[in-house]
Image: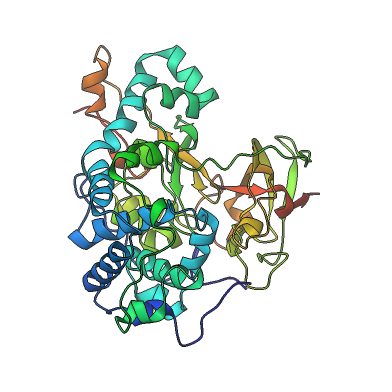
């Protein structure tokens, strides 16, 4: 059964203001013994401070500097990033997709907001927006223009719509002029957006 | 026809607005909504497909006006009542909250790291043999609807219904959301990445070389010409 509600969605029984709505539900669930406020704080701290796009940037910088790592990453990203400590919720099945002089990759989830949390953290607002979800598959080049990115005419755009539990990480091209830079320095060139495919790294 | 969440290719949404990398949460209640939802998930009363479908079943008017975390918290409230975990009177405050029989399953702070690290892998053994190999031509189901349940959950977007593509890779065998979301079993089957030329999907593709790749289950596909 799809369980459609007609006029009486239970959520409508809660306050309509979203902050009050969350507070009311949190209070009720705490009083019922279903949630532990200390566990909530732990979850928040994880995504506010411990898991974020620097994880993905480390993977990209390693791929740029270590050919054996890059080859293993392209073969089985899930196992390779797990060895770096990046695994778990919303990163159970990872695939790395590599930008080349011929192909630019870009990731979206048109049906919801699927995103590789262990490598990039919580998705940004724009990734979850109707505009990105609606437009990325039909007019990726106009979406890239919203980010100030313009691709040469000869490059094909390949947009990955995350419709299953597979999560995609874009490995951008290493910028020219970065020869000799070490992994830590290279990481600073790798933005979150470049690993979603809405930015292109540049040597600074 | 699909539901309101299925917006890939829709016209009229306007610009995408970039934001800095260090803006993670935009309000304190966003954090709480995320944490409450994750914590309730660990009670084990539903799976990721059930909870996605709960968000998709929000009324179109609600879905369109709610922000991301409002969708989460509202769908969560609906699921808690549907599963009998919370009563309507408890939600309104008309009844005093009663301790839940599930209270011993409540996520504790010391268990959070383990739960997040474990995640929810979707690959399963399956006796459904892969029918397609990389390079094969395939055509997607049309219309993009759940084959068993009217209005049920599916992960085939409307924009890719009835389209011809080619298989890029086999991801292994994964839980079928169309079944799992409705308590009909995990029904794992082969899952493929399938590439579609933009010209197959849109009347006015931006560029002749562009492609869209979707992850699609074997039962969404038939052999292409």
Q: Please state the total of marks drawn on the protein image.
A: 0
The N terminus of chain B, quarter of image: bottom right
Residue at the spot x=48%, y=61% of the render? B51
Q: How is the image coloured?
A: rainbow
* Drawn side of residue A181 relative to residue A149, left or right: left
Q: Evaluate whether residue B27 shows in this view.
A: no
Q: Is residue A48 visible?
A: yes
Q: Quadrant of residue A16?
A: bottom left
Q: Nearer the viewer, residue B103 or B51?
A: B103
Residue B110 image point, x, y percent: 30, 39
A189 shown above or below A46:
above
Place residue A119 in its image quadrant. top left
Residue appearing at x 77%, y 40% in the figure: B127
Asked whether, in this view, residue A198 is left or right of residue B48, the answer is left
Q: Residue at x 49, y 60 (%)?
A: B52
Q: Residue A134's spot in the image, x, y percent?
A: 45, 62
Residue at position x 44%, y 32% from top? A99
Q: Nearer the viewer, residue B47 or B103?
A: B103
Question: In terms of depth relative to the viewer, which is nearer, A15 or B199?
Answer: A15
Query: Against A78, is A35 above or below?
Result: below
Give percent across and percent down for residue A80.
45, 23
* Side of A89 where B33 appears, left or right: left
Farthest residue, direction bottom:
A7
Query: What x and y, as percent, mark residue A44?
Result: 25, 48
């Amino acid at each position: 059964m799809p369980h459609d509600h007609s006029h009486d969605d239970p959520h409508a029984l809660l306050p309509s203001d979203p902050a009050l709505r969350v507070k009311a539900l949190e209070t009720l669930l705490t009083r019922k013994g279903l949630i532990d406020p200390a566990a909530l704080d732990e979850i928040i701290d994880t995504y506010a401070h411990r898991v974020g796009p620097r994880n993905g940037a480390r993977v990209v910088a390693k791929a740029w500097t270590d050919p054996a790592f890059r080859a293993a990453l392209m073969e089985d990203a899930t196992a390779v990033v797990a060895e770096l400590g990046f695994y778990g919720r919303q990163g159970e099945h990872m695939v790395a997709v590599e930008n080349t002089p011929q192909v630019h990759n870009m990731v979206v989830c048109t049906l919801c907001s699927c995103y590789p949390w262990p490598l990039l953290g919580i998705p940004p607002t724009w990734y979850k927006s109707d505009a990105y979800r609606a437009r990325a598959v039909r007019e990726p080049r106009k979406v890239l223009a919203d980010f100030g990115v313009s691709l040469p005419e000869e490059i094909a755009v390949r947009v990955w719509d995350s419709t299953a539990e597979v999560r995609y990480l874009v490995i951008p091209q290493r910028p020219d002029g970065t020869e000799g830079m070490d992994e830590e320095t290279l990481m600073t060139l790798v933005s979150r957006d470049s690993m979603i495919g809405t930015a292109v790294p540049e040597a600074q | 026809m699909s539901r309101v969440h299925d917006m890939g290719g829709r016209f009229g949404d306007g610009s995408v607005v970039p934001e800095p990398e260090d803006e993670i949460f935009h309000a304190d209640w966003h954090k709480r909504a995320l944490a409450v939802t994750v914590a309730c998930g660990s009670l084990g009363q539903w799976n990721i497909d059930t909870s996605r479908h709960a968000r998709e079943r929000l009324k179109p008017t609600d879905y369109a006006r709610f922000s991301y975390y409002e969708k989460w918290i509202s769908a969560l409230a609906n699921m808690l009542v549907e599963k009998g975990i919370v009563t309507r009177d408890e939600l309104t405050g008309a009844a005093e909250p009663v301790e839940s029989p599930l209270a011993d399953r409540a996520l504790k702070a010391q268990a959070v790291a383990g739960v997040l690290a474990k995640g929810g892998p979707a690959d399963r053994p399956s006796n459904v043999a892969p029918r397609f190999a990389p390079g094969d031509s395939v055509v997607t189901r049309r219309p993009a609807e759940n084959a068993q349940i009217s209005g049920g959950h599916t992960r085939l977007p409307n924009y890719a219904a009835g389209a011809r593509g080619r298989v890029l890779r086999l991801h292994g065998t994964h839980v079928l959301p169309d079944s799992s979301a409705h308590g009909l079993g995990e029904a794992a089957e082969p899952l493929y990445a399938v590439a579609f030329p933009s010209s197959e999907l849109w009347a006015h593709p931006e560029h002749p070389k562009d492609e869209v790749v979707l992850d699609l289950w074997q039962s969404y596909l038939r052999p292409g010409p």
